Amino acid sequence: PDRGSFSSLITQIKGAKVKLAVTGGKTVSGTILGIEEFDKLIKDEKIAEKRLILFQDDEVISKIKFTEIKTLDILNEEIKKDLKFFLDTIISGKKKDAKKIKINCESGGNDEVDRIIFVSYIRESPIWKTSYRLIMSKEQALEEKCLLSGWSLIENTTNQDWENIELSLVAGMPVSFKYEFYQPIFIQRPVIRPPRVLSVKPTEIEEGFEMEKFRDYEMAEIAAKPAAMRKKAKMRTGVPPPAPGAPPRGAIGYGGMQSVMDDDALLEKVKSQTKI
């Protein structure tokens, strides 16, 4: 174990409820508060001594030397599970190629019948190589004969020795593939950001243009009534009617404004006041 592993464990589980077995056959239960360290002189030699600060169940704080602690039992089930998961993670990291396989075998109804189960697996192996050797002795040389021998070189990369095995060699490229089965795969999703474009001018309410148009019509209608009345009065006094094509008399109303506005002039005014 690593140096100071017990101290590191106590520091990580601070606040957990534990049950300690100390020297003398005593048991102490309580909550871990922390660790106290101090130096102690023994024969002119400074030695660091550690003590566990424990808040006991009877609401008494006690200091227990590390050397007096025999066993430590963690009473919190969640902390136990976390500690076990941490240790399993460490051991699995050291054995990266090791995988746990659990096989559940169920009988077909008759438990008294013995059965034999064969388990097989496929593992990647290096290619096998060939080596040819030409063997010729003196007698064979005189007889102009020789022996050509072909050897297959095979490498055992497993963790077990090959004993009493059957080996078959095939030629050709392997028809297989690799897949990252244990690696999590995430799909890239597009990121949509809100627009940050400012308008060139403040937005004007269209209702304002409608109100101005209504006021123009209302003012034209009011100005037209006095003009019509003056026209009738002049006709009674014998004033001749205006010439054809000339502007009508009384066209100038109150404040010098045109009394009657035709549709084209009104449309041009609305267009000039409209802002895009």
Image (tube, rainbow, N blue to C red):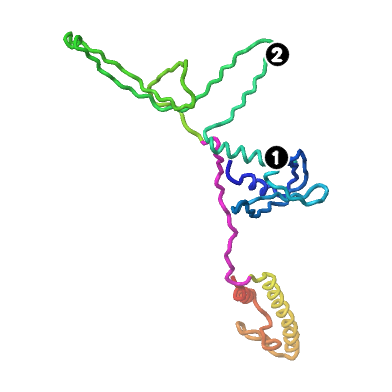
Q: Position of residue 3 (x, y in %)?
A: 58, 45
Query: Looking at numbered disc 1 in the image, what kind of residue is underneath it?
Result: Lys
Q: Which of 56 and 237 is in front in this view?
A: 56
Query: Looking at numbered disc 2 in the image, what kind of residue is underneath it?
Result: Gly
Query: Residue 109: which disc?
Result: 2
* Residue 12 located left or right of residue 123: right
* Mark 2: few/some/many CA within 10 Å (<14, 14-19, 20+): few
Relative to 140, say whether 121 is above or below.
below
Q: What element carries label 2?
A: loop
Quarter of the view holding residue 220: bottom right
Quarter of the image that includes the N terminus: top right
User: What is the magenta range?
Assistant: 180-202
- Label 1 belongs to which residue? 70
* Mark 1: few/some/many CA within 10 Å (<14, 14-19, 20+): few
Relative to 113, say whether 72 is above or below.
below
Tell which circle, 1 or 2, labels the residue nearer the N-terminal end: 1
Q: Which residue is drawn at 67% across and 73% down?
A: 209
Q: Position of residue 232 (x, y in %)?
A: 75, 85
Relative to 159, say whether 106 is above or below.
above
Q: Which residue is drawn at 61% across and 44% down?
A: 5
Per the image, is 247 magenta?
no
Tags 1 and 2 touching, CB below 8 Å: no
* Residue 44 located left or right of residue 164: right
